[in-house]
Image (cartoon, grey):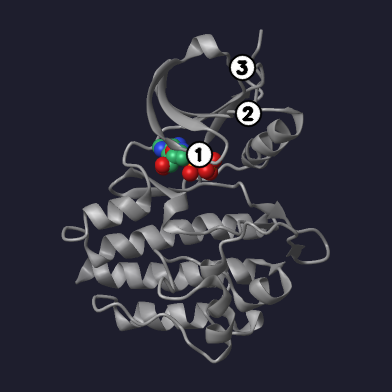
Amino acid sequence: EDGADISGEHKISKEDFVVGRILGEGFFGEVHDGTGERIRVAIKTCKDCSADVKEKFLSEADLMKNLDHPHIVRLIGVIEADPVWIVMELYEHGELGNYLIENQYSLSTATLVLYCLQICKALAYLEGLNMVHRDIAVRNILVASPECVKLGDFGLSRYVDDQEYYKASVSRLPIKWMAPESINFRRFTTASDIFSMAQQPFFWLENGQVITQLEVGVRLHKPQLCPPIIYSLLTRCWAYEPSGRPSFGQLACSLSDVHRMEVEL
Ligand code: ADP
């Protein structure tokens, strides 16, 4: 038996899956699609898995196994025998960032608001568990169906204990997506998660210029097709002071109203 079990119901082992094509290159190694009994899966592998690399690789799965939400990538299990596998549910349509570009002329505003609302609910759920994601971006959201997206990539996620925020020490951070206090003080909270979310913000700046621009009040412009009500929600999320930003719960309520209006139009 080489299977480790996550759900508490049954062990999984490599014989349960047929490995298919390469979906992409992950940070630790290739990600393949695969087929299990009655389920399509994504299999994350770890290339040079020494003991400490393995620990880092598995830390994401460790966090994910406690999560259960309709808009969060579902972990199926971990197989610890070399080479280590992390097995997840497969989302056939791939990364949201690419999906948005490929379908830019057919996606309605109502659908885009629906995606925002779903991710917002996932983040409100994390907020309730005192977890910060730290890497919210469309490259880390997967499309399960045209009506359903899932938040993934918990590689940078952390529980925030009693001290209320997570202080990062690593240097591999997504500067252009980050809130001012995260750039300045490496301070990560739910309020800094609220600040994030965009395709490639500030692509015209060097990482080092981002904070000075943020501090003089520069923010992303309103895209032409973005409804004013959504842009006004966004500008509240980009408040300099973390306390001036809405919570994910509040944002989910506002988005749900906007979604209802868009559907009725
Ligand atoms: P890492 O976070 O380790 O760098 P990624 O999550 O970026 O790895 O995965 C690498 C590639 O595999 C990406 O292109 C991603 O879209 C794809 N991928 C990862 N998980 C899934 C999944 N559950 N369903 C479909 N595609 C996935």
* Mark 1 beta carbon near ligand 1 (under 8 Å): yes
Which dot marks residue 26? Answer: 1
Q: Of the residues under marks 1 and 2, which one precedes in the sequence?
A: 1
Secondary element at image label 3: loop
Give the residue at x 42% y 66%. Answer: 198
Q: Amino acid at mark 3?
A: His
Residue under pointer 3 = 10
Q: Position of residue 194 (x, y in %)?
A: 55, 69
Q: CA distance from mark 3 to mark 1?
A: 27 Å
Q: Of the residues under marks 3 and 1, which one precedes in the sequence?
A: 3
The answer to whether mark 2 and mark 3 are in CB contact below 8 A is: no
Quarter of the image for the N terminus: give it: top right
Q: Can I make out residue 40 in this image?
A: no
Q: CA distance from mark 1 to mark 2?
A: 13 Å
Q: Is the residue 135 above or below the residue 8 in the image? A: below
Q: Amino acid at mark 1?
A: Gly
